[in-house]
Amino acid sequence: MAELSPDDFAAYFAAIHSATPDPSDRVTPFPWQERLLAEVARDGGWPNLLDLPTGTGKTAAIDVAVFHLALDAALPPEQRKAPRRIVMVVDRRTVVDQAFERAKKIAEALKSAPNGILCTVADRLRGLAGLREGEAPLALAQLRGGMPRDDAWARRPDQPLVAVSTVDQVGSRLLFRGYGVSDSMRPIHAGLLGNDTLLLLDEVHLSQPFRETLLALRRYRAWATRKLPDRWQVVEMSATPGSASAASDGRRVFGLNEDDHRDERLAKRRRAKKPVTLGEVKVSGGEDARRATFAEACADHALRFVAPGRAVGVIVNRVATAREAAAVIRKRTGDSADVFLVTGRMRPLDRDDLDATIGRLVRSDRVRDTTAHPVIIVATQCIEAGADFDLDAIVTECASLDALRQRFGRLNRIGTIEDARGVVLVRSDALAKDHVDPIYGKALTETWKWLGEAARDFGIQALEAALPEGKRLAEMHTQKGRAPVMLPAHLDAWVQTMPSPAFDPDVALWLHGTEQEQTPEVQVVWRADVTELLLARATADEAAREALLKRVEACAPVGVEAISMPIHAVRAWLQGGAEPDLADVEGRAAGEEHDAKPRSGRLALLWNGDDSRVVEPGDLRAGSTLVVPSAYGGLAGGTWDPSSQEPVSDLGDRARWQQTGRPTLRLHPEVTQWHTDVTDPAWPEAPVPVVDERSEAEDRAAMDAWLSEMSAATAMPPWLGDVLQALAVKGRRRPALVRIDGVALEDDDGKRWVEPGYFALVGRFRARNDGAGDVTTEGDGASYTGVEVTLREHLGGVAAWARRFAEQCGLPLDVARAVELAARWHDAGKVDPRFQRMLHGGSELRAAVAPEPLAKSAVVAADRAARAHAFKRSGYPRGARHELSSVALLQGCAQLFDKEVDRDLVLHLTASHHGWCRPFAPVIPEDEPVELTLDVEGTPVRVSSDHGLARLDSGITERFWRLVQHYGWFGLAWLEAILRLADHRRSEEEQRGDVGARGEK
């Protein structure tokens, strides 16, 4: 391993961030950044608080964390102190994430480094996970709203990772109740975030309840009687000087010193002028009229600053106000300016497309052109944190002082604009005596009073000199709630993930406090091959329900195509009611409408894999993922707009390719119309299913011919060209051809028609190296990976991965042996002859003549019809758990356990590798039990499928609680995650076909 020392940090920093190799362009770290690295490397741990003003480059904490991890890699695994996972957490719904962009820049520089300091750092990071040369040394993730079968960030326990997310997403996952995450996957998320993780809590003043929760978790982690490697740290970060949340209780605070004040680059930012003027906007009438008046005023002030080469920001407190202001400005500017609406209520793919456009126009490192088209950004709170915008002028709605400081951090960001100006506007009704703002409370009016007492400048130095102290300053800040006292009983409730207990404390209280009204959220996905009539028929007709699920299952939803919205806003939209007042502040209510009379409305599919169902608006639940027809509308310009009736684009195929790397293409005409230029008449017509007229071989031949013709087409977006290329492979890697037959429907008036059938092409493996994959141990589709794999090959492969993960993570030798042994037996219960028939597509003959048992089927999970056929013919009891049979077989092999191995741990890891047995196993009647036989070192082990392990007295539940006490709430979840992710990675290898797996015949 090449030498690396803290003295190399400056060279590493410059190699990543310098625009060219020219020494004159060399970017060096600020003094505080070098000092922080030296301190962390010396102590092996981080300060409790980084007290750094806006504009001083605090996102470089990511650079420091990555470099420290590389330094630490030279130590033996059990001696390492640097956490592998670096997670930046902010309590804002950001649209352009400066932290993620920085992490992406670091990761790309390390991956492509041919030599020098970056190559040394990259090789050390690869060594932490045993990665091969050329593999990405640093993984990236944005933890968005979860959904079933969407766990892209949680691929490996040993992979160095930088993730960026929100308090809701990180906090709910950490407390075993991940929003939108299935019960099965919750322990994996909690196990990874609760171990080997550095949590950088940005803008800690926004997140006091979550800070208190993390402090409580830090204490309770020490309760485990068996210690595992402890590399879990929390670092608070604040851009508000004097946030002494850490100093007040004696913990370590890191801030600027005289070296930083003498640095001319930092001094320039601190001296930057940001003078503001004030304006009260007289409003009257109903809310629509008041909002329209205020939007016009915002436009009036913003247009005064518009000039060639300038970028102007308009920042307001509500999404609806932002939409209206953007519409007014567009109408008044026409083609004379580029106007962009930026809110946090967007689908991630739409957000990425927007960022690609506006980033080059407003980022602080852009090349300014005084002749360029003016740019106007109309935004909500989503740009308060994390957005590297450097605007020439800002017009903002009044808010609390802490929010305004964040907003003006986007004005004259690096101190190079001589005539930067700001305007603060307030609605007259917000100044009424008894008015309490739903977001900012009384802080808004107190801030307005203080602003009016003297000329104000939001420059860092100028504002620091003018700020009052004590009670007056506190009254201008958004009042933060307190988290409830966390008791061990709360963790005991949350650690029960499958099934969850009847008493299940709402984790939102520990994320945002008890004083704040909570706004649970749901995710919405639009699909063009789902129609309103199909949803209606699926409520009463099982054939229609199956047809609906086949359509969605063919391209299961993923996070980057979903918009996260408050549940009451989606309910009102589906019911056709008035739009609630929405802000872009995480977890906080703003004008929520409480309808005393629940109304029916348009239907949606509540997506939950095989347990999906059609629901009415009144049936929505927090964390749900809803699939709705594109024809419902609801988006305009990529932003939430419940008044819009325009069909919404179907991003399913593109999203699945971008996020998982698995190529998928649905050839439904309403879907393909959203792929740019797909409807070009020069393109060949896609084949469609013909009932009873073509064999499967003929369908395949027709599809191959179409793919061959498509290979010559050029008018298509790059992602679609890549997908078509990946789907054109032959042999064992040939994609699955999923047939979606048409379905006859009849509406309430007796009118009949047929929803058209179509084909879907689904790749059998991840075809993009930077895709996260979609192999999982979640749900009953986990055995349908599209490639036949024998049980012997699979168990041996998972055991090898588990041993590797355990060693890399520095687990004690006896614990590592227990994890490996559980991995070697986890799927042994699949020897059940009924399960074998199911893996062979329902064929009793194929199962009988197979030379050895299978672990994985050649059927793909996306082919719902093929899976249903195989299950029906197999005779396997619905809901039965093969992992319990694995435990029964293990209990019959006493010779496997010696005093060096924790028998309880082996049995629990085996029982829980699909998420069950935390703490109870499902009770499934065995009406016709069969005998299971497994050869163990030449000796057959036989058990009945009616093993009784689901009984309360079987020992499953008592064992779980003993292990929780022994390894801790998060330690046990970590060990489960190590085994289950070993299973995922081996299954992914098998899908690629490079480990002796057999493709579909």
Image (spheres, rainbow, N blue to C red):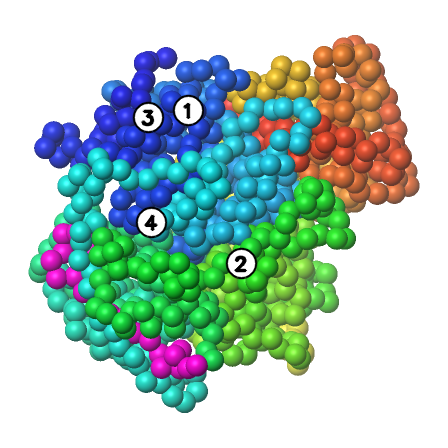
Residues tagged 1 and 2 counted as in contact (Cβ below 8 A): no
| Secondary structure at numbered mark 4 | loop
Disc 2 to disc 4, how far (Cα)? 21 Å
Q: Residue furthest right?
A: 927
Query: What amino acid type should be assigned to the residue bearing mark 1?
Result: Asp
Query: Is the residue marked by circle 1 packed among few (<14), some (14-19), or many (20+) residues within 10 Å?
Result: few
Q: Earlier in the sequence, mark 3 or mark 4?
A: 3
Disc marking residue 910:
none
| Secondary structure at numbered mark 3 | helix
Residues tagged 3 and 2 counted as in contact (Cβ below 8 A): no
Disc 3 to disc 1, how far (Cα)? 9 Å
Which residue does the image show at 60% across and 36% down from the upper left? 219
Q: Is residue 591 visible?
A: yes
Residue to which mark 3 is pinned: 38
| Secondary structure at numbered mark 1 | helix
Disc 3 to disc 4, how far (Cα)? 23 Å
852 lies left or right of 100 = right
Which residue does the image show at 11% across and 64% down from the upper left? 308
Disc 4 to disc 1, how far (Cα)? 25 Å
Q: Earlier in the sequence, mark 3 or mark 2?
A: 3
Disc marking residue 43:
1
Give percent across and percent down for residue 142: 44, 45
Disc marking residue 481:
2
Query: Is the residue marked by circle 4 packed among few (<14), some (14-19), or many (20+) residues within 10 Å?
Result: some
Residue to which mark 4 is pinned: 241
Query: Is the residue marked by circle 3 packed among few (<14), some (14-19), or many (20+) residues within 10 Å?
Result: some
Disc 1 to disc 2, how far (Cα)? 33 Å
Magenta-tinted stretch: 411-433
998 lies above or below 440? above
- Say which quadrant the N terminus sits in: top left
**In this view of the protein, which residue sits in the foreground, 959 or 714?**
959
Give percent across and percent down for residue 168: 52, 52
